[in-house]
Amino acid sequence: NLRITEVAIPILMARVLTYPERVSYYNIEKLRQCIRNGPHKHPGANFILQPDGTKLHLKYCDRRIAARDLKYGCIVERHLEDGDIVLFNRQPSLHRMSIMSHRARIMPWRTLRFNESVCNPYNADFDGDEMNLHVPQTEEARTEALMLMGVQNNLCTPKNGEILVASTQDFLTSSFLITRKDSFYDRSSFTLLCSYLGDAMENIDLPTPALIKPIELWTGKQLFSVLVRPNAFTKVYLNLGVREKICTKKCALTVEDKTSEAVHDAMCPNDGFVYFRNSELLSGQVGKKTLGNGNNEGMFSVLIRDYNSHAAASCMNRLAKFSARFIGNHGFSIGVDDVQPGESLNEKKGKTIGEGYQECHELIAQYSKGALKPQPGCSRAQTLEARISGVLNKLRDTAGDHCMSTLHWRNSPLIMSQCGSKGSPINISQMVVCVGQQSVGGRRAPNGFIDRTLPHFPINSKTPAAKGFVANSFYTGLTATEFFFHTMGGREGLVDTAVKTAETGYMSRRLMKGLEDLSVFYDQTVRNASGGIVQFVYGDDGMDPVKMEGKGGNPLNLDQLFMKVMATCPQRGHETLSPEAISQMLNDKLSEQDPSAGGCSDRFKELLTKFVGNRIKMLRNTRRALHLDEDHVGRKDSSIEECVAANISGIAAKQLQVFLDTCLSRYHSKIIEAGASIGAIGAQSIGEPGTQMTLKTFHFAGVASMNVTLGVPRIKEIINAAKKISTPIITAELLSGQDESFGVKVKRCIEKVVLGEVAAAIKIVLKSSQPNLVVKLDMQRIEAQGYEGINADSVQLSIINYPKLKLKSQHVRVIDEAKLRIYPDGTDRSKLQFELHNLKSMLPKVIVKGIPTVERAVVNPVKGRDKTIERYNLLVEGTNLLAVLGAPGVDAMKTKSNHIMEVNQTLGIEAARRSIIDEIQYTFESNNMIIDLRHMMLLADLMTYKGEVLGITRYGIAKMKSSVLMLASFEKTSEHLFNASYAGREDQIDGVSECIIMGIPMQLGTGILKVRQRLESLPEFKYQPAPIMSS
């Protein structure tokens, strides 16, 4: 019953929390009644503050006399009442939506209550969570809380513009059930359900029933349309096309244009394409994609963009009330019978697991015989593990598919999974069919005892059961060994969570300290507290991340906007434009927009031009298909074909005008406001998703053995500006990328080859005259491996240049093409034996070819969207980017490294900045997290704007900031304060930390505004010396 903007406060708390209200003509009677009620009866009051400063406690005085003597100007500390503005917070406060303002609703009992839709920003659940409540004590504080921190104004996250406050769990389930194709309601049921929307207090226009005879019946989709637009006075016209989870691609035709695609998608046999036209739900079962959080294409996101947050909030309120009541009456439960597999499913499962085990046993047999061919860059053991893991993952997926296909459509877990309220197909298949492979550290269970995982299995057993594959389901129950493996996997998750909290907490604190004082000024520049410019325009385009609509941080979702314009501004009575006329109109409009004079950016112009170009292309294709002239458009009434072409893809002049005007006005409304504390928001946007990342993540970059550090450790490496990173990898693009053999040749040029790999023998020859070492090269192997340029002369040079041996040219002699003789340096015959053996142990490590810092290189096939190999590149494990760029066959223009400090040394500071942005983005995307690029740009600019790459550490921040108090509040407090006092340093007190320490308003947000008075307008002040007092 609570709106999303409300919080229920128990009377017990409302009597303790007070608001100081000043007595005026309008509220004196209300406050007198509060005083009479006193501190123990709600709504009462606790204190009266007299104008002369005296404070009267109402527990110990005659309340009737106090009420009678109440005067204007007194301040009464009254109890909280309905409608008061309070701040609501849940710790940990990881982002700005962790504390928001709500309106109070005083209710009985002893718990704080609020609408479930608002759980997500707080990350709260109703299992005993504790939350904090604060009451702003002045009208200014209430105003700021309401306007800046109100739930209604914080529906979307500044992390990426996605909606956070949206329907969840039961609300999604009931919406999904209501909008089924087979849900029909008679007049009494339909009107009863409509009354749920607004406590029977809202005017509702009943739509025309879908069925007239033999009885009037309304559909569930009509009910949902009423929910979006209850009556004609609600001027909300929702136009939307969303693919839900259950939408199959079998019927969807891939057309470049979204509206055309919508026509085909609406024929989805599962009713999975949700299509709203002018607030009428025409097709689709609504689910999480339409109503849930975590996207910016759903219903509430579109309502915020097309109308305002009030429209979205009132729709959310109606949905919450309606859904909760509907599901309470309809009933929805889950039981053991929901996860009970049938006989046919058990047979399929047995057959699938049998086939999978057989395939694994064959692979193990091949490995034992030495017949298993290794994958590129992998050993045989690694190849076996990769192949078996692939088979077992496929086995679980196949069993899961069988399970999902056999479940009844009324199955409760299936419904929850389909609508997105809880669970996934994997959860269901684990309960019904097969739990699957348990992984420890991203691999199968390791050998913990003497060469075995558990004492129950033979030594060195690599079978699925011995390495953690759980063939049972949770319904059938796990065997003892399966249970052990399952707990191993579970324990890793728990340890990971515990360790991760401290790691990410410290990382977030450092980010916040580094970025806290960055804000946008009135000239659109981003500056720090001391006025130093970090960016000339925020994020290169000055856009506010919280208002972004399109994918990839684009300001507008042009497809959705065009769909809305076409629906709300029909063609009737207007002729369609020719392709040339459309292009001309667009060019005329964009020529007026000059970025330097406040117009839209060049990037946005490109997007708009590309979109309109696709519409023109579609218009031409339609006309060609109807055998009409592509460039010349005739009147609609001239032929049926002309009329059809106009209806399918025609654009009228008025429609294009409205579309372009809306695009440009919306673009300007998304420019970031001056005073926005983008530094703090950027730090939260990078720090908060870090808490959801896995700690020890390794990702296989294309090949099974090429590990790349990801997750929290990688983010730490980047923001620390680490000189040495755990997995440096250079991605080298090839000049001839289509040819794999060319890649192998380049790999052999780059990869380090040591003498031990190419020497047939290294022997000590003891002669009475001069003992020496003989090195014989294996020329057959050198030729077979394709190592060009390795011979006795090149090896001689390598041995002389190897620093640890300290040999000169006279000590190394070439006997023939494949043979060398090495004489130890030294005349002391007593140490000769030791020196010879030392030389023999050192020589195999001499690098004879390739780049010394490169451990290995792997030719990596790069696959396209259709899973076919597009080209080959080279993954080089190691450092020395400069040498790789200069290697023959490497395309230096497209080659990049993940080692930021090396990029800085090799290519300069701008390349390092770009590298920081790309690496942070790649790390987050690997964890399926989308963060607006502008936050990463800001962090990269802060780390590089001084001309060197500075880490967000105690050393880096000391170079970035000059304020003593700020540095003292971060780390090494006593050291900073002592040094500053010793040197007599001044502090300007203009940053965030300093202002908080001194208790003065900071120059961010509402504090950026200053009022200045012209000096010439002030009255002239004449100085007169004070008269000398006469005796």
Image (cartoon, helix red, strand yellow):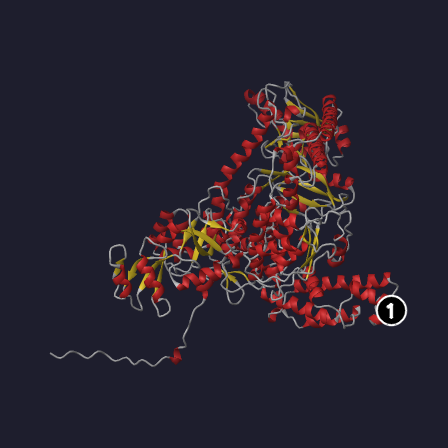
Residue 853 in the image, given as x and y percentages of width and height: 62, 38
Indicate the amino acid at tag 1: Ser
Q: Residue farthest to the front?
A: 214
Using the image as rendered, state which of residue 412 and residue 897 is in the foreground: 412
Tally the marks: 1
- Which residue is found at the position 77% from the left and 54% from the top? 264
Q: Indicate the position of residue 121 as horizontal and vertical percent values.
A: 52, 50
**Picture quarter with the C terminus:** bottom left
Percent of width and height locating residue 578: 80, 70
Name the residue at 66% across, 59% down.
Answer: 557
Side of 881 where 689 appears, left or right: left
255 with respect to 732 (left or right): right
Residue located farthest toward the left when viewing the structure as drawn: 1031
Answer with the quarter of the image where residue 582 lies: bottom right
- Which quarter of the picture shows residue 704? top right
Q: Is residue 915 visible?
A: yes
Q: Which residue is mark 1?
A: 639
In the image, 283: left or right of 727? Answer: right
Left or right of 452 on screen, residue 782 = right
Q: Secondary structure at mark 1?
A: loop
For this orientation, the residue located farthest to the right is 627
Residue count near mark 1 (Cα–Cα under 10 Å), binned few <14, some 14–19, many ≥20? few
Q: Residue 562, how many percent across, how many down? A: 70, 63
- The vertical placement of 858 against 774, above or below, is below
Q: Give whichever of 11, 742 is nearer the camera.
A: 11
Confirm whether residue 877 shows in the render: no
**Camera-side residue of 205 and 5:** 205
Residue 58: image quadrant is bottom left
